[in-house]
Amino acid sequence: YQTKGNMARDWVALLGPVNDFNAVSYYPFLLPEADRAKAWEFLFNTFDGTRKPYAIAETGMAAEKLELTKVGLTIEGNPAAQLEHYRTVLGLARQ
């Protein structure tokens, strides 16, 4: 999900015709919490349009605060958010 530009959609359009399926990586902690539902919507809208199978190939949610001091990044996380993320992913897999 990108708030500026459509780079992800452009890549799907470019590579879609030559792929048999699409694999997606999604790490919700990289987005503000308010944008996470929009990111799922973006993924489904983008990949449903390819009419090819797709899968969440990798995902994760931090269970605790992670400070990456060398790159100046702090990832917020907690066990409840992690549990909710995996419940969402597994619920979507059932669909």
Image (tube, rainbow, N blue to C red):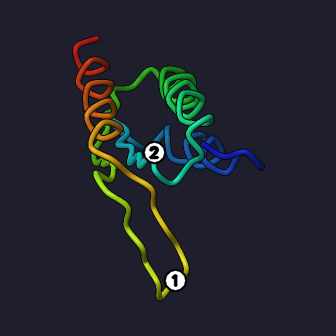
- Which is nearer the eye, 20 or 66? 66
Look at label 2 and name its amino acid. Answer: Pro
Residue with the most extreme bottom position? 70
Look at label 1 and name its amino acid. Answer: Val
Residue 84 at x, y = what percent?
32, 29
92 to 82, vertically: above or below: above
Residue at x 60% of width, y 40% of height: 13
- Which is nearer the eye, 92 or 74? 74
Q: CA distance from mark 2 to mark 1?
A: 19 Å
Pick whichever of labels 2 and 1 is earlier in the sequence: 2
Residue 89 at x, y = what percent?
30, 28
Query: Left or right of 59: which side holds 11?
Result: right
Residue at x 37% of width, y 67% of height: 66
Residue 95 at x, y = what percent?
29, 11
Residue at x 45% of width, y 20% of height: 51
53 to 60, vertically: above or below: above
Residue 42 at x, y = what percent?
58, 30
- Which is nearer the eye, 40 or 54? 40
Q: Residues within 10 Å of mark 1 (few under 14, many from 20)?
A: few
Is disc 2 placed on a helix, strand or loop? helix
Find disc 2 in the rendering and name its residue.
28
- Which is nearer the eye, 1 or 22? 1
Query: Left or right of 72: which side holds 79?
Result: left
Q: Which label belongs to residue 71? A: 1
Query: Left or right of 15: which side holds 22?
Result: left
Q: Residues within 10 Å of mark 2 (few under 14, many from 20)?
A: many
Is disc 1 placed on a helix, strand or loop? loop
Q: Quadrant of the N terminus?
A: top right
Residue at x 35% of width, y 43% of height: 23
